[in-house]
Amino acid sequence: MIEANKLKMQLKCPMPKLDFDVITLGHGSGGVLTNKLLDSGVFKILSNPLLDERHDGALINLEGKTAFSTDSFLVSPIFFPGGNIGELAVNGTVNDLAMCGAIPKYLSLSFIIEEGLTMTEFWEILLSIKCACEKAGVTVVTGDTKVVEKGKGDKIFINTSGIGSIHPKANISSKRIKIGDKIIISGNIASHGMAIMSVREGLQFESEILSDTTNLNHTISALLDTFGDGIHLLTDPTRGGIATVFKEIAQHNGVGIDIFQSELPIDNQVSNACELLGLDPIYVANEGLFISFVDESIADDFLKTLRNDDNGTQANIIGTVVETHPKQVIMESVIGGKRVVNMLPGEQLPRIC
Amino acid sequence: MIEANKLKMQLKCPMPKLDFDVITLGHGSGGVLTNKLLDSGVFKILSNPLLDERHDGALINLEGKTAFSTDSFLVSPIFFPGGNIGELAVNGTVNDLAMCGAIPKYLSLSFIIEEGLTMTEFWEILLSIKCACEKAGVTVVTGDTKVVEKGKGDKIFINTSGIGSIHPKANISSKRIKIGDKIIISGNIASHGMAIMSVREGLQFESEILSDTTNLNHTISALLDTFGDGIHLLTDPTRGGIATVFKEIAQHNGVGIDIFQSELPIDNQVSNACELLGLDPIYVANEGLFISFVDESIADDFLKTLRNDDNGTQANIIGTVVETHPKQVIMESVIGGKRVVNMLPGEQLPRIC
């Protein structure tokens, strides 16, 4: 985050004087006002040769195995401690591509704006998108802007889709998970969800809980360089938290998963906040976090390398793939008891990403 | 449309008995309910090996020049004469790719659902998506489903992004437009906009005005096979109508455009409806319509070929690229007068696509 903020400062891209302060339905007409909005904002900040073509789509060159991913973001509030919906939308799709073992390259960017969003808010979001793209090394090449009436949306929803080239050494697939695989988490759990929740509930802590939103692609790429196909599966536990991800993997692949609660890294304040609100952190959403299923033989080296990365300082081995209890996830608690872990049953924190 | 409806009948895919009738916030949690929704609907209807992998993104093989496009659809009402938001979302992105001279291949599909949407509505939309994909020859390979609270969305918004391979004979770019180019429209204007408008305004006509939503990719592909780089630019005049598209092209490329109103094909009822509502059809949205800028030397043959295609029976040469009045679009009216055509100034029909 600090790095992204620094980048934002460097941009020195103050908003130009415009003859409108808020976005209206007309800005989604496809006509004069849409062009005005795009000229004054999107194309100014995100300008690059492919986007500037302004055709119905972008022409890109791709070779070989490619990953393709999409995500719509409708987090509320759109500005939260540690980030905003703009960088979340870039990082989210960048990370989904990275989880496929891809090197993210091109993004599409589609806005659904509720009339009444201020240009100041939109400008701030665009700047964050720009920064997040630069940090991740991706380019927005095509886009779309629509506006809905007041009360038919909520400030702004953003869809990003992304394309990336599969890393030459990557061989990521849930089919490659095998008994004995070590499960490694890259850092503290539940930070993003609790950052959002603390704003919504008006909770005050000694220091603010920040979202962990960040791009993971450079970290993943470096790990693939070193460990190649020793990495069997990568996944980022966003909505539904780590519990849901583990259960999905166990269920779809017919394997058992053992998790050790005592090994789960979590920030003290986040843990306290969860307790205060009666939330189990294994169900709380994460953004800049990933889980690796790696071959037992490389697990220790993998962990050592990951801990040397800015995105992995709190990394830990938290579990194992086991033969017993197929399709089940069992968590050994801090005091030694065992419990079955299922997916998030209802809805804990709507509009978390 | 008739063809798509036939296809839908053939699907014989009745909705299974479910233990829920409406979509709730929990269906967007990422947990149990999201899995239930996806298992019972999306994965059942759209199933294919790439989508069934259920990873964060899809792995595809691409070679050479590729087009990438995105669009969010928020048409209201979601069911309208001649189609619904599902097929619109597929056709829209398929056509954007076709306009780049690409053969559309893969789609991403992202839903933003307002809680309260019924499963019957969602099922109908999914079936239409399936049919539209089959008709266009594209596959949904990755997706996302989110739910927002009542009053923070409007039934359903759909984003599709698409990837296609550039046709080997295509060389489509606004830079290739030149003085003397003939401008050919593929069919009747203003049908989609007036279909939506007639529902909203409760207008009754002798026969219903139907949206022209359809996929244009096979038509374009056949034209590229025959005419190759004689086709300089392709564009589909959706939001803002043909007027806005012409003005954008003239402005961004510094050329003049002459249009002959008498040559513009329009359905009688659509024309009457426009008059009744005081709308100029050149600003009304189209969906299954495209405009080609072609070399003067091939214009007549191009028109003849296009008229033999189901999507081109009403095609006509409607204008020329001229040296005089650069950046200006001039329309010669039916009675011989001339008027300057600008982009759609405000908003005519919000939520048209």
Image (cartoon, coloured by chain):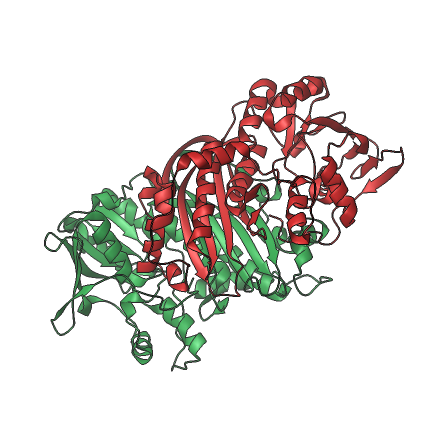
Chain colours: A red, B green
Q: Is residue A43 left or right of residue A65?
A: left
In the picture as drawn, the residue positioned furthest to the front comes out as A206
Q: Residue at 53% of width from left, 47% of height from top? A: A85
Q: Residue at 57% of width from left, 32% of height from top? A: A216
- State the image quarter where residue A282 is shown: top right
Question: Which is more toward the observer, A164 or A253?
Answer: A164
Q: Is residue B48 left or right of residue A114?
A: right
Examine the rendering and report whether any part of residue B189 can be seen: no
Q: Position of residue B108 (x, y in %)?
A: 51, 47
Q: Position of residue B189 (x, y in %)?
A: 30, 66
Q: Is residue A303 left or right of residue B133?
A: right
Q: Quadrant of the N terminus of chain B?
A: bottom left
Q: Residue at 34% of width from left, 44% of height from top? A: A44
Q: Quadrant of the C terminus of chain B?
A: bottom left
Check the image and report above or below for B114 versus A83. below
Examine the rendering and report whether any part of residue B72 can be seen: yes
Check the image and report above or below for B115 versus A229. below
Check the image and report above or below for A266 versus B154. above
Q: Residue at 62% of width from left, 42% of height from top? A: B54
Count of numbered tags: 0
Question: Which is more toward the observer, B322 or A290?
Answer: A290
In the picture as drawn, the residue positioned furthest to the left comes out as B324
Q: Position of residue B253 (x, y in %)?
A: 21, 48
Check the image and report above or below for B306 versus A137. below
